[in-house]
Amino acid sequence: MQFENLHSWLAPKSLPLLISGPCGAESLEQVLETAKGLHVLNKVSLFRAGVWKPRTRPNSFEGKGEEALQWLTEVKKQFGFKTTVEVANAQHTELALKHGVDVLWIGARTTANPFSVQEIANVLKGVDIPVLVKNPVHADLQLWIGAIERVYNSGTKEIAAVHRGFHFYGKTKYRNKPLWQIPIELRTLFPDLPIICDPSHISGNRELIPSVAQKALDLGMNGLMIEAHCNPAQALSDKEQQFTPAQLNEVVSKLVLRQQSASNDKAIDKLAQLRNMIDEIDDELMNVLKKRIQVIEEIGRYKKEQHITIFQLERWQEILRTRGQWADKMGLSRQHVEKICQLLHEESIRIQNGVMNE
Ligand code: PEP
Ligand code: MN
């Protein structure tokens, strides 16, 4: 695949390229008020708003549909913004085209479904409109590439991938884990495919967004999609992660841009890549530790109820023996694993003692 240069179809007003707007278009007033706030910043190249919102659970705000497309036409008229909406099927795509939306985006849940992506791609045959393809909900690079290929095969060469993180079953500090190695691999396979990061949906809360956005830039991503709402506290979806336009301005102003050398876009710093992988793995380790401690507390409560002692020699011996065997099988140092077991066991005893003496 050979992609068009992002700058030829989405000229950035500032570095980095910034896409912003509310999670969802809720009313004409909300859309215009948000657009007005973003317009004065003079940093946003593309105004986003969901008009069909794929929601995990029913009875949540599912978007205003075609009516909201007219609000976006107003945004174009009043503020000169180019606009983008999420399309999830052929009908959405036809309506978005009918109402003059400038760029389409395919959401994470849709990318995960090849039938839906193909249906959208079929409508796009012979149509000249850029498309942003978000990564699928789960960590499947091939599925992401497959969606990009389906759009590409419809004839559009103006495509950008959007990295919005991946669902993770369990607790993490992110709403969607970034798993940076996946967009890095995509960049390696398709060096001329622009990649835009969506730190809003990775983070799920305002506090995390600046560091995620910075990391995306440090990895050489080509732009950011960040949600903004004129009144985040009243937002009908994703209220925890939306900035006011003024807050967005502050966050974007603080981003540090690395020296742009000609090769910088393509060559991602190897050390940064590897360190990012370590960050991910440590985040996973924390998760696993947390789960282990929760089970230990449960054991502590049970032992207390049953009047059983905390320290059980046979169990401890069994742990040491089996973990040593597992270490051998996995090619890990037995000594290293035994040291970790020792630490885990000490902490386990400390926690159970706490539970017993509650
Ligand atoms: C969105 O951008 O508001 C959205 C629904 O995103 P995603 O498809 O990444 O969940
Ligand atoms: Mn959202």
Image (cartoon, rainbow, N blue to C red):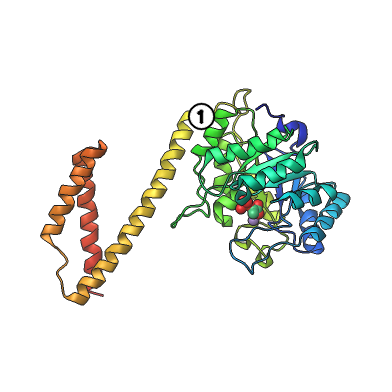
**Is residue 287 or residue 260 the one in the foreground?**
287
Quadrant where the image shows the N terminus: top right
Residue 115 left/right relative to 28: left
**Horizontal side of residue 295 vs 39, given as left or right:** left
Nearest the eye: 314 or 65: 65
Of residue 209 and residue 324, the one placed in the foreground of this image is 324
Q: Element type at marker 1?
A: loop
Place of residue 271 in the rendered image (x, y in percent of width and height, measured from the top left): 45, 31
Residue under label 1: 269
Is the CB of mark 1 within 8 Å of ligand 1? no
Against 355, is 104 above or below? above
The answer to whether residue 358 is left or right of residue 252 is left
Q: Using the rendered image of the protein, determine whether residue 336 is visible from the camera's viewpoint.
A: yes
Circle 1: residue type: Asp
Point out residue 273 in the picture as x, y percentages from the top left corner: 48, 34
* Spot occupied by residue 296 in the image (x, y as percentages of width and height): 27, 63
Q: In the image, what residue occupies the spot 63% across and 40% down?
A: 147
Mark yes or no: residue 195 visible: no
Question: How many residues crowd mark 1 within 10 Å: few (<14), some (14–19), many (20+)?
Answer: few
When asked about the image quadrant of residue 158, the answer is top right
Q: Quadrant of the C terminus?
A: bottom left
Residue 103 against residue 78 in the figure, above or below:
above
Q: Residue at x 43, y 43 (%)?
A: 279
| Residue 221, quarter of picture | top right
Q: Nearer the viewer, residue 235 or 98?
A: 98
User: Which corner quadrant of the image does residue 350 belong to?
Assistant: bottom left
Q: Residue furthest left?
A: 313
Q: Left or right: where does residue 351 sit relative to residue 38?
A: left
Residue 153 x %, y %: 69, 33
Q: How many marks?
A: 1
Residue at 48%, 34% in the rendered image: 272
